[in-house]
Image: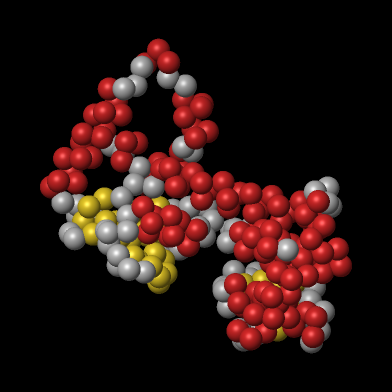
């Protein structure tokens, strides 16, 4: 049986619940990304918050909070088979308990740790490279990450910019974090037009580009190291790498 969910974390956990209390799953996928196969025996499950909560509590009490962190970060990855890896990881975890994450050579653990690390690494990179622009009465920061990480950025920037209204816009997934100086939330968000920044923002951007160029010592340029810290695919929304 292939279980399909609505793409939410609770949807995934509902499928895990069905694996144990309905019919064993051969795989779990988000319905929005599932590659249709005529030979698969598949079932679309409606997200059930109560069932999802039971699975969540079971992971926390029978495995560990570290395992939950790996599960959630892996869920945010863009890997097509991530939910299948999570199913096998949780099956093993419910047998082994907290010791599962010590078995770093087990294939089911390797895949989850690998994807979890990729998401964590990308979040860390954007904490240092995300650039906000002043637009109207608030700030706007576009990005196009490989993984679905804007939720992992929200609390950090809400704390740093607690008196500013801001939008962190994932242009790849058409969603955004909206912060109103009191709380943040995630919503669907599409904005394809060119962002009109304030005159003060233009001046700051010009000053920042000038500073970036002038502190550079040509004889010490290490483009390979620069690409390692700021991969080219992330530079389209970073001011100092723009035209």
Pick the quarter of the image with the N terminus.
Answer: bottom right
Q: Residue at coordinates 35% horizontally, 42% vertically from top-left?
A: 238
Location of residue 147 (image quadrant): bottom right
In the displayed structure, 243 sits above or below 192; it is: above
Q: Position of residue 16 (x, y in %)?
A: 73, 76
In the rendered image, the residue lying farthest to the right is 95
Q: Relative to the observer, which residue lies in front, 191 or 139?
A: 139
Q: Position of residue 183 (x, y in %)?
A: 36, 69
In the displayed structure, 192 sits above or below 129; it is: below
Q: Residue at coordinates 82% horizontally, 64% vertically from top-left?
A: 97
Q: Position of residue 111 (x, y in %)?
A: 74, 54
Pick the quarter of the image with the C terminus.
Answer: top left
- Specify whether 105 is left or right of 57: right
Question: Exactly how many numbered labels are in the figure?
Answer: 0
Q: Relative to the observer, which residue lies in front, 222 or 207?
A: 207
Location of residue 37 (image quadrant): bottom right
Visual colour scheme:
secondary structure
Q: Relative to the observer, which residue lies in front, 35 or 104?
A: 104
Q: Position of residue 70 (x, y in %)?
A: 67, 58
In the rendered image, the residue lying farthest to the left is 199
- Specify whether 122 is left or right of 13: left
In the displayed structure, 171 sits above or below 189; it is: above
Q: Is residue 104 visible?
A: yes
In the rendered image, the residue lying farthest to the top is 219
Q: Residue at coordinates 67% horizontally, 84% vertically from top-left?
A: 51
Q: Relative to the observer, which residue lies in front, 148 or 192?
A: 148
């Amino acid at each position: 049986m292939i279980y399909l969910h609505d793409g939410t974390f609770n949807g995934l956990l509902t499928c895990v619940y069905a694996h144990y209390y309905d019919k064993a799953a051969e795989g779990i996928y988000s319905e929005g990304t599932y590659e249709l196969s005529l030979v698969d025996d598949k079932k679309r499950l409606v997200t059930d918050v109560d069932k999802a909560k039971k699975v969540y509590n079971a992971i926390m009490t029978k495995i560990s909070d570290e395992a939950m962190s790996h599960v959630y970060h892996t869920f945010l990855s863009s890997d097509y088979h991530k939910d299948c890896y999570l199913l096998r990881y949780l099956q093993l975890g419910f047998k082994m308990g907290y010791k599962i994450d010590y078995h770093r050579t087990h294939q089911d653990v390797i895949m989850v740790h690998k994807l979890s690390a990729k998401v964590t690494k990308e979040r860390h990179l954007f904490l240092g490279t995300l650039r906000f622009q002043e637009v109207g009465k608030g700030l706007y920061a576009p990005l196009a990450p490989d993984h679905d990480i804007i939720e992992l950025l929200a609390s950090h920037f809400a704390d740093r910019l607690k008196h500013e209204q801001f939008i962190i816009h994932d242009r790849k997934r058409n969603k955004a974090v909206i912060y109103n100086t009191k709380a943040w939330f995630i919503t669907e968000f599409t904005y394809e037009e060119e962002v009109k920044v304030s005159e003060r923002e233009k001046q700051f951007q010009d000053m920042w580009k000038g500073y970036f160029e002038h502190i550079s010592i040509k004889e010490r340029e290490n483009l390979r190291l620069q690409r390692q810290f700021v991969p080219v695919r992330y530079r389209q929304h970073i001011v100092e790498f723009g035209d």
